[in-house]
Image: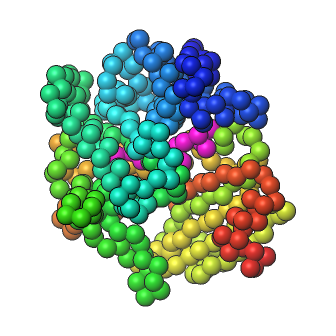
């Protein structure tokens, strides 16, 4: 197999993240993990060398493809790498066929990621980036701008579901957005309310303002404007951080997991499901915050855990979400994703309501820090532990 970490371009063109991983001896185990994710991907005819150069020069887009490649293997799917496009031509164990095109919303070439052209706030700018990239892939499928061989003309694409897998990397804050912005872009859902009398309510939003006089439609899965896209795969945890976790190197980890149980379930009577916030110390470096509230017939909430990477548990598929387009010309069958970690998101045309089927324990977010007293203190303070423990 081609070595991802053997430089194939000039030193001055190497991405800063690639340089950091390659130069720091602590990241040697992480290199091995990332290399293992590439199994099969680098065997594509005449594409291996090109992919490695992209990995070394642009990094994020290649990391996302590497993550997806390993995720498909974990699901037991086969990828036909004899096809040049889309990125993944997939066959499930039962012979079901679909295609995945991978894309990221990345930083402006040469930009810091902290720049903010037009004075747009972080969320508006991030949502516009996601919409722009999805629109690019629809154009690729349709054959806009004079493209001679649009995806829709390919025999292995024409009659099967077309999925876009997207991840946000456009600013330093991108990976903190959880699923709020993709919910806005696809289903037109505003941020959940935190008001006591209206907790969890989400406004319906149809447009966001790009600049004065220019509004951009959101909720693209609430109509047939993007019918070519059967579904969207999304994650803010399928990143370099996933490789760090899987490598086992020493880090401080903050994770947030969604929790849900039926109010009639016997476990709902246990203290762990009592409404409100509760804080626990789980040893010298282990901390847990539980938040619970009643929602219809369920008790829902989240568990925020801060602990060393040596005790943190996370699968490769944790944090992966799939959004299904009810207007898709070739709908994607949700049953192909048999893994219990994956969150599924639907939109009901009849009721104009979204339905988010997130399993109990679904990973919402995960951040990592150098294992230092300062990082631990700052993390504990931001989550409210220091005032209670």
Q: Which of these two is toward me, 116 or 35?
A: 116
For the record, the magenta segment spans 232-243
Give the x, y percent position of residue 263.
50, 76
Q: Which of these two is toward me, 145 or 73?
A: 145
Confirm whether the magenta stretch covers residue 348. no
Residue found 66% across the figure and 33% down from its top: 21
Residue found 26% across the figure and 50% down from its top: 325
- Quadrant of the drawing holding the N terminus: top right
Residue found 70% across the figure and 52% down from its top: 369
Q: Is residue 357 visible?
A: no
Residue 192 horizontal side relative to residue 134, left or right = right
Relative to 25, say whether 245 is above or below.
below
Residue at the far bottom: name it: 197
Give the x, y percent position of residue 168.
44, 48
Q: Which of these two is toward me, 121 or 379?
A: 121
Relative to 2, say whether 302 is above or below.
below
State the colouring used for the structure image: rainbow
Residue found 42% across the figure and 43% down from its top: 108
Q: Is residue 217 visible?
A: yes
Relative to 348, say whether 34 is above or below.
above
Residue at the far top: name it: 46
Q: Which of these two is toward me, 357 or 70?
A: 70
- Quadrant of the drawing holding the C terminus: bottom right
Quarter of the image where one finds residue 163: top left
Give the x, y percent position of residue 147.
18, 26
Q: How many marks?
A: 0
Give the x, y percent position of residue 121.
41, 63
Residue 159 horizontal side relative to residue 25, left or right = left
Confirm whether the magenta stretch covers residue 237. yes
Residue at the far right: name it: 284
């Amino acid at each position: 197999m081609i070595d991802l970490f053997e430089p194939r371009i000039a030193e001055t063109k190497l991405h800063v993240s690639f340089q950091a991983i390659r130069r720091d001896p602590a990241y040697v185990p992480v290199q091995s993990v990332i290399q293992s994710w590439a199994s099969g991907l680098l065997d594509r005819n005449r594409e291996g060398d090109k992919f490695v150069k992209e990995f070394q020069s642009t990094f994020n887009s290649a990391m996302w493809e590497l993550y997806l490649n390993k995720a498909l293997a974990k699901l037991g799917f086969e990828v036909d790498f004899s096809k040049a496009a889309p990125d993944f031509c997939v066959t499930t164990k039962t012979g079901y066929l679909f295609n995945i095109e991978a894309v990221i919303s990345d930083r402006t070439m040469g930009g810091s990621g902290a720049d903010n052209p037009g004075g747009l706030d972080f969320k508006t700018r991030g949502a516009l980036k996601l919409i722009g990239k999805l629109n690019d892939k629809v154009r690729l499928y349709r054959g806009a701008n004079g493209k001679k061989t649009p995806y829709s003309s390919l025999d292995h694409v024409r009659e099967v579901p077309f999925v876009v897998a997207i991840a946000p990397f456009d600013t330093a804050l991108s990976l903190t957005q959880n699923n709020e912005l993709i919910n806005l872009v696809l289903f037109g859902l505003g941020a959940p309310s935190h008001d006591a009398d209206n907790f969890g309510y989400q406004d319906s939003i149809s447009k966001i303002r790009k600049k004065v006089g220019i509004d951009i439609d959101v909720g693209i899965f609430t109509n047939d404007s993007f019918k070519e896209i059967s579904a969207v795969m999304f994650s803010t945890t399928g990143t370099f951080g996933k490789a760090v976790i899987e490598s086992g190197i020493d880090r401080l980890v903050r994770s947030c997991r969604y929790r849900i149980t039926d109010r009639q379930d016997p476990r709902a009577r246990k203290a762990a499901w009592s409404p409100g916030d509760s804080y626990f110390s789980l040893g010298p470096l282990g901390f847990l915050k539980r938040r619970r509230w009643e929602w219809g017939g369920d008790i829902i909430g989240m568990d925020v855990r801060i602990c060393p990477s040596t005790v943190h548990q996370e699968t490769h598929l944790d944090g992966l979400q799939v959004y299904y387009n009810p207007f898709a010309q070739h709908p994607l069958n949700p049953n192909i994703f048999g893994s219990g970690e994956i969150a599924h998101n639907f939109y009901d045309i009849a009721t104009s309501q979204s339905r988010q089927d997130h399993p109990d324990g679904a990973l919402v977010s995960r951040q990592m820090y150098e294992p230092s007293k300062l990082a631990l203190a700052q993390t504990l303070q931001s989550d409210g532990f220091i005032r209670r423990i």
